[in-house]
Image (cartoon, rainbow, N blue to C red):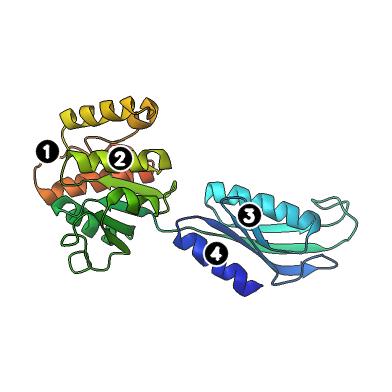
Amino acid sequence: MDEIILKEVYNQVKNGYKVAFATITKTIGSTPGKMGATIAVFQDGNVLGTVGGGMIEHKVINKCIECLKTEEDYNFEYTLNDNGNLGMQCGGTAFGYIKIFKPKPKLIIIGAGHIGLALFKIAKNLDFYTVVIDDREEFANTNRFENVDEIYSGDIESIIKNIDINDNTYIVIATRGYEGDLTSLRSVINKNPKYIGMIGSRKKWIKVKETLISENIEKEKLESVYAPVGINISSNSVDEIAFGIMAEILLVKNKGSLKHRREK
């Protein structure tokens, strides 16, 4: 059973989801779960494993759900008697630890041109899980994007349909033209990633937004798109534009603020 739990924990984290993994580390007296018992609680609410059932397991699962939200590990102690915290007669105490496994933030770069390549290099240094998509194989390849986690060439819309996107996903659209940007945004806007940014002029963004609104895509969702993308650092350098995009992503990811650290 432990092997099955660990495999599923690995798969969930690999696919970009958090997992709460709880282990009984010590018991005193009579408890339903013994030392070493494990349970995993996933973001979708599914549970795998057991720490003995009953009130302790109920309490541990609820605490795991809390820890998934706070992303903080937790030491627990639950006692099964009238004077303890579970109000039961068994008399035993279970001690344990909840570990939150967090995936790397996933950056999907749609467009493998100069901006996409520069952005990829910065993202790898920041330990993002990187996915690169382009409709041109001569651009989207592992010779150009060395050590990329996933890379795809072909029809952008079809590729995106098969990629897992969640609230740990950040997307930058930087294709070679208007139609590619429009198709890309149309494909990801309803998948609810943490961040969508699109490169280009304000004029192009207005046209893209108007087109998608006419297709009944919610205006509120489009208003959440960072377009034109990036923090303005007053440069036309490809590397500095990419740096400004990544700075904006980190601002969203870390809930930062646009302030100098020297400010009081």
The C terminus, quarter of image: top left
- Disc 4 marks a residue whose amino acid type is Val
Local packing at callout 2 (Cα closer than 10 Å; few below 14, some 14-19, many 20+) is: many
Please state the horizontal and vertical placement of residue 36, each as a whole percent of the image: 69, 72
Q: Is residue 261 something one can see in this rendering? A: no
Sequence-wise, which precedes: disc 3 or disc 1? Answer: 3
Quadrant of the rendered image containing residue 100: bottom right
Q: Nearer the viewer, residue 242 or 254?
A: 242
Marks 4 and 2, how far apart at CA: 31 Å
Write down the residue under mark 3. 46
User: How far across and down, in percent of the image, does residue 250 sit?
Assistant: 32, 46
Which of the two discs, 1 and 2, labels the residue nearer the N terminus? 2
Q: Nearer the viewer, mark 3 or mark 1?
A: 3
Q: Which residue is mark 2?
A: 185
Mark 3–mark 4 Cα distance, whole angstroms, equals 12 Å
Q: Secondary structure at mark 4?
A: helix
Q: Disc 1 residue type?
A: Ser
Residue pointed to by mark 1 = 234
Which is closer to the viewer, label 1 or label 2?
2
Give the mark nearest the N terminus, 1 or 4: 4
Q: Is residue 179 left or right of residue 47?
A: left
Q: Position of residue 72 (x, y in %)?
A: 54, 53
| Image label count | 4
Please indicate whether residue 21 sits to the left or right of residue 207 in the image.
Answer: right
Q: Where 202 sits versus 29, above or below?
A: above
